[in-house]
Image (cartoon, rainbow, N blue to C red):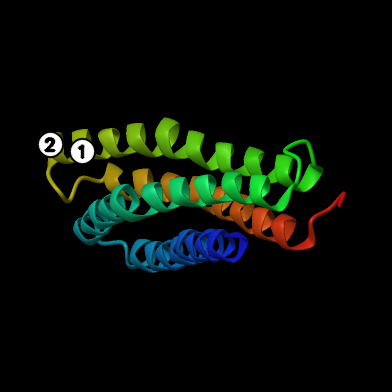
């Protein structure tokens, strides 16, 4: 059971972190081109992928991780597990508390001024900045999980 849970946990991390990095890089490239319509279309795609892939994958990762802690006999009070849970919670809060409202602002801009609205570029630029911080946290979680400080 340990190997199965570890495999699910690692695969979920690869999809979540690797996919997030790829989307971030693509977002920077689209933003650099500066076409508000293209940026808006890309943002719509990102939001679809986030809701259908990244959110469920992060939950699968969390569940597999919790089951793995129990299966392996680790303690939730261990530093490396606590740090990983804090990082996961940070990403969850950013996802629910920032990206959702940010997307609503973007949709309001488009509804008011069309898909070429001037505020689209700034909206997506801000979202990518927040995502940059989130990606850093996710990388730190990977480092934490592989080095297991305090173990």
The circle on residue 142 is none
State which quadrant residue 26 falls in: bottom left
State how far apart marks 2 and 1 are (Cα).
6 Å
Picture coordinates of residue 150, whole percent (x, y): 87, 49
> Could you tell me if residue 129 is visible in this image?
no
- Residue 113, compared with residue 26, is above or below; it is above
Residue at x 34%, y 35% (from the top left corner): 100
**Element at badge 2?**
helix
Q: Quadrant of the N terminus?
A: bottom right
Element at badge 1? helix
Viewer-closest of 16 and 150: 150
The reply, left or right, for residue 47 in relation to residue 85 is left
Instruction: Verify CB contact (< 8 Å) between mark 2 and mark 1.
Output: yes
Quarter of the image holding residue 59? top left
Identify the residue position indicated by label 1 in the image.
107
Q: Where does label 2 land, which residue? A: 111
At 42% from the left and 63% from the top, the residue drawn is 28
Say few, some or many: other residues with alpha carbon within 10 Å of mark 1 (under 14 / 14 to 19 / 20 or more): some
| Residue 65 spot, x, y in % from top left | 59, 49
Furthest residue in direction right, as rendered: 150
Residue in the foreground of this view, choosing between 63 and 98: 63
Q: Position of residue 41 (x, y in %)?
A: 21, 57
129 shown above or below 109: below
Please state the horizontal and vertical placement of residue 145, each as a whole percent of the image: 70, 57
Which residue does the image show at 66% across and 59% down from the upper left? 142
Q: Residue at position x 78%, y 36% from top? A: 77
């Amino acid at each position: 059971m340990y190997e199965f849970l570890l495999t699910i946990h690692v695969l979920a991390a690869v999809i979540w972190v690797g996919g997030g990095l790829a989307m971030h890089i693509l977002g920077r490239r689209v933003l650099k081109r500066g076409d508000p319509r293209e940026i808006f279309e890309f943002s719509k795609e990102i939001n679809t992928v986030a809701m259908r892939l990244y959110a469920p994958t992060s939950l699968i990762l969390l569940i597999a991780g919790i089951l793995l802690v129990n299966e392996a006999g680790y303690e939730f009070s261990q530093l490396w597990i606590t740090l990983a849970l804090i990082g996961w919670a940070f990403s969850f809060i950013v996802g629910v508390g920032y990206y959702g409202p940010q997307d609503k602002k973007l949709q309001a801009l488009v509804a008011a001024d069309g898909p070429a609205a001037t505020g689209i570029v700034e909206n997506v630029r801000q979202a990518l900045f927040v995502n940059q911080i989130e990606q850093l946290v996710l990388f730190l979680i990977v480092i934490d999980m592989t080095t297991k400080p305090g173990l």
